[in-house]
Amino acid sequence: MATRRGVHPAVHHSGLREARRRAASAVTIPRNVDNAVLEIAGREVKLTNLRKVFWADLGVTKADLLQYYADVTPVLLPHVRDRAMVMRRYPNGATGEAFFMKRAPSPRPDWIEICEIEHDSGNVIGFPIVQDVASLLWLVNLGCIDLNQWYARCDDVDRPDYLHFDLDPGTATFTQVLETALIVHEALRGLGMPDYVKTTGSKGLHVYVPIVRGPTQKDVWTAAKTIALQLARAHPRLMTAEYKVARRPASRVLLDYNQNAWGRTLASVYSVRPHPRACVSTPVTWDEVTRGVAIEDFRIDNVRERITRLGDLWAPVAHDRGRRFDFARLAS
DNA sequence: GTGGACA
DNA sequence: TGTCCACAACGCGGA
DNA sequence: TCCGCG
Ligand SMILES: [Mn+2]
Ligand SMILES: [Mn+2]
């Protein structure tokens, strides 16, 4: 069981692709050992089971997953920084059993920042926060395939930075999801709400409206519910906002407004998902939605190239400057 | 994925 | 030493 | 107040 220490500058594999990859992150995950200790900005990150296969059909290992996250760190971090993180751990890979974990496990490095959130029950949960590459790799090493951060930053956990529409196909087709997204987009445009869309990497799409921080999570939930119910009423053959499964009509896209409730999370942008093809939750343009995209278009093997080409299409969602919609204008 | 409780 | 086990918990609305 | 739901 070899252990390596430090990031190795030596070039073992030459070629443009390797060079570009290293340039992107400056962190290289060792490939020919099971365990390693990386030193990143003076912090030691212990990585384990690096050769464990996480996607058997694809031959994708835990090291591949860690390398992906190291490479996308610059575009990913602004979206998750300062937010409590819910972990969903897949210790046995994408097809293995998974479990949720909220409390940051111990032992852990003392540089893992914790967000303590008190619940109405009186429970206080200490969630980890992903602030940098080191904490990101620590979290992924736990077996987290996707990242599920809170909508609100830790300094004010009841005032989110966005509202969203979670579009779930259920028994509907993905073409219907695309159609629904365009209608949601039009409706939001009418409300003066700039919005951003991404694939979930699983089945559906996420549409986010970044907002000026102020309204509570309940306010945001209420607004999303109102809009979802109106849309479903206007397009009853395409959409539903019925929360109860048994009462939900078949072949309709679910506008899952309840996902805007306090304490809930969604897979973050650039999260890999436990999908058979290792798909990634990927920002797309409204033009791409119009022309038609597929979940499987965006995967762990090709999203980095897309980011190199297009940058972060969701950057406005991650910065105060881009969080433009003010709820005061909604008081109609 | 990993530490703690048991046998 | 090996095996088993835990690892989350909010809030809506219908009953 | 309990349950289904995600
Ligand atoms: Mn969804
Ligand atoms: Mn959903």
Image: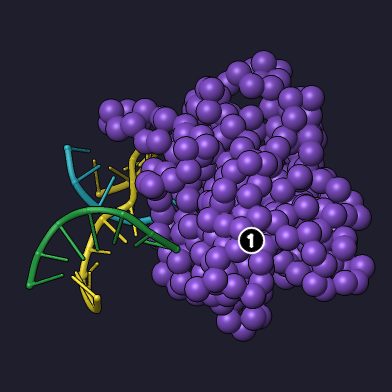
Chain colours: A purple, B green, C yellow, D cyan
**A233 relative to A177, above or below:** above
Does A193 sit left or right of A92 as displayed? right
**Disc 1: which residue:** A66
Amino acid under disc 1: Leu
The answer to which image quadrant residue A60 occupies is bottom right
Nearer-the-camera pick, A284 or A270:
A270
**A50 relative to C12, above or below:** below
> Quadrant where the C terminus of chain A lies?
top right
Measuring from the top left, give residue B1's x and y in whole percent: 44, 63
Does A121 sit left or right of A30 as displayed? left
Measuring from the top left, give residue A163's x and y in whole percent: 62, 35
Chain letter belonging to callout 1: A
How crowded is the residue under tag 1: few (<14 C-alpha within 10 Å), some, or many (20+)? many
At x 91%, y 55%, the residue is A309
At x 50%, y 73%, the residue is A1
| Residue labelled 1 has its Cβ within 8 Å of some atom of ligand 1 | no
Measuring from the top left, give residue A195's x and y in whole percent: 76, 39
